[in-house]
Amino acid sequence: MSAFLAIVRRELSSYFASLTGYILIACVLFLIGFTITDLLERLNQESTDVPVTEMFYQTWYFWLILLLASPLITMRTFAHERSSGTFETLMTAPVRDIEVVLAKFASALLFHLLLWMPLFLCVLIVRYYANDTTAFGPPLLASAFLGILLLGGLYMSMGCFASALTRSQIIAAVVAFVLGAGLFLLSFRSLFGIPRLGSSAKILGYVSMIEHMQDFVRGVLDTRHVAFYVTLTVFFLFLTLKVVESRRWR
Amino acid sequence: MNDGAMIEASGLTKRYAGHPAIDDLSFTVARGEIVGILGPNGAGKSTTLRILAGYLPATSGFARVAGFDVFSQSLEVRRRIGYMPENNPLHLDLRVREYLLFRARLKGLGGRRMRERIDCVLEQCDLADVRHSMIGQLSLGYRQRIGLADALVHEPELIILDEPTLGLDPNQIRAVRQLIKDLGGYHTVLISTHILPEAEMTCQRVLILHEGRILAADSPENLQQHVGSRGQVTAEIAAPAAALREFLEGLDGVAHFNVAPLDGEFLRCALTPLPGLDLRPALFAAVRDRGWTLRELTRSRPTLEDIFVHMTRDIQEEEAG
């Protein structure tokens, strides 16, 4: 456990030791600011019964941030250690492979959540000035936060997997982006694709992240969605672990 | 615990894509020994050390460190070793003390003992002055010592250093060698190097590796005797040339000799003895009895370099013939 915490600490500090972390935070902050401005304008134009979190989500900035920031957060995790050679000193220290994978995943996820924190601050500010507090109820915010957590977990685990495959951070970022964007685009097939009957439409409906997220931001907690993200995250972490272990049987 | 062997390797083989990097290595290292693995680049030194450190698995054969199998009990082994890989990779974005704190935590140290150990290795490796400097801004000499400090911080039983003096200047090399020598006794040390005098100076025993196989494993002195039994004797003697030649012709055990005039009345004699003989006492006795003057008497000691060239040449001749 102390090794796990040591790695988490080191990983988190590495985001702030280089400029990468600050630039990411600044860019995401900029996009969130945009979103909030958009949102306030819409709120001023007409009255609506749509929750604020859903309105935020409908601006699509959410997906832009998720798809673009995730590969940049995770590209460093394993690829950098491999290219600088520190992977060897790490793996010859008395730490289990799974501790390394989980610690790197956990720190990427923590940083990802940190990126989203300004959003909740903005929502709280809007709530302060709006007279109607029910539109910003804690359950709604918690559900939206859970959605960000679960989607973030999945994208971080895919990113860790991509990073473990290579020693080049660029390749790691590209692979992670392709995986993430690919999964995201599947939901378009079910939303806007040719309406199909039968099992394929049903399956596409299950993996549609846009629909999942729509539920989360409305405050609907569907265990199917939770199970979907948790299993996929575990699956990618398992793959990452196997890649890390592969040096022992290659 | 077993018979006190720190490292036991048997039939260790590693193939990369079918090509053997090391081939059937068997050796043991006793506790407290300083052992050097010597060999040219690509001889399989780093591969051997990586297997022992639990980073790579062997294709076949087994190795035990302190009685634990390096593959199936890797974690137990890794707790007991301090390993510094080749080129000594470090986190360049950390400060020296931060890095050592991270590494110490990773190795399960904590609390007061961790801080004591870090202060201790900072002192030991002469890093106290730079403890708050960024590693990326330090010179190679410092970085190498940071790697050493990392290897030592958890007081491992076995220290494995891959080319510890690579890229250092002569003063730094001397300091690192002294440090390694001081470690012997408390720790078992296994170092690899392609610089032969280094092994000669620091190691009690050397394994000579060539193309993945062990050519020789012995103390530097014994290896020297083995090859150096035909060591040439050089003497500078002031004596009548004819008398000297006559004496040398009559001396037992001389394969052949050569006498050349030097300055004044001194003559330079170069004697090649028959294998296994030392001609120096006989030569000295003759000079004393006859009242000649002796100003130099040396027997050439082959360096490990000679031994190495000698052995690898033998191998190549065998393969050619």
Image: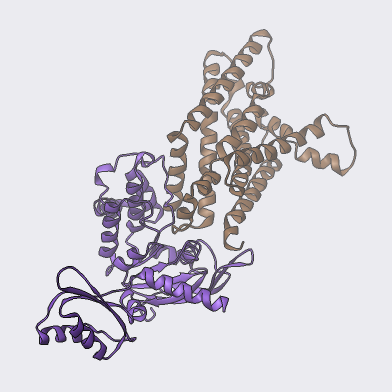
Chain colours: A brown, B purple
Please identify the quadrant where the N terminus of chain B is shown. bottom left
- Residue B45 is at least partly visible in this image: yes
- Residue B69 is at least partly visible in this image: no
The percent position of residue B167, horizontal first and vertical second, equals 37, 51
Residue at the far top in the pictured view? A45
The percent position of residue B47, horizontal first and vertical second, equals 50, 64
Location of residue A68 with respect to A225 vertically, above or below: above
Residue at the far front in the pictured view? B242
Location of residue B113 with respect to A11 vertically, above or below: below
Residue at 48% over, 55% down: A88
In this view, the residue in front, B177 or A22, is B177
Q: Is residue B305 left or right of residue B233?
A: right
The percent position of residue A179, horizontal first and vertical second, equals 69, 40
Residue at 55% over, 45% down: A79
Residue at 30% over, 62% down: B180
The percent position of residue A64, horizontal first and vertical second, equals 65, 27
- Number of residue marks: 0
Location of residue B165 with respect to B234 vertically, above or below: above
In this view, the residue in front, A43 or A250, is A250
Please identify the quadrant where the C terminus of chain B is shown. bottom right
Residue at 32% over, 52% down: B145
In this view, the residue in front, A111 or B34, is B34
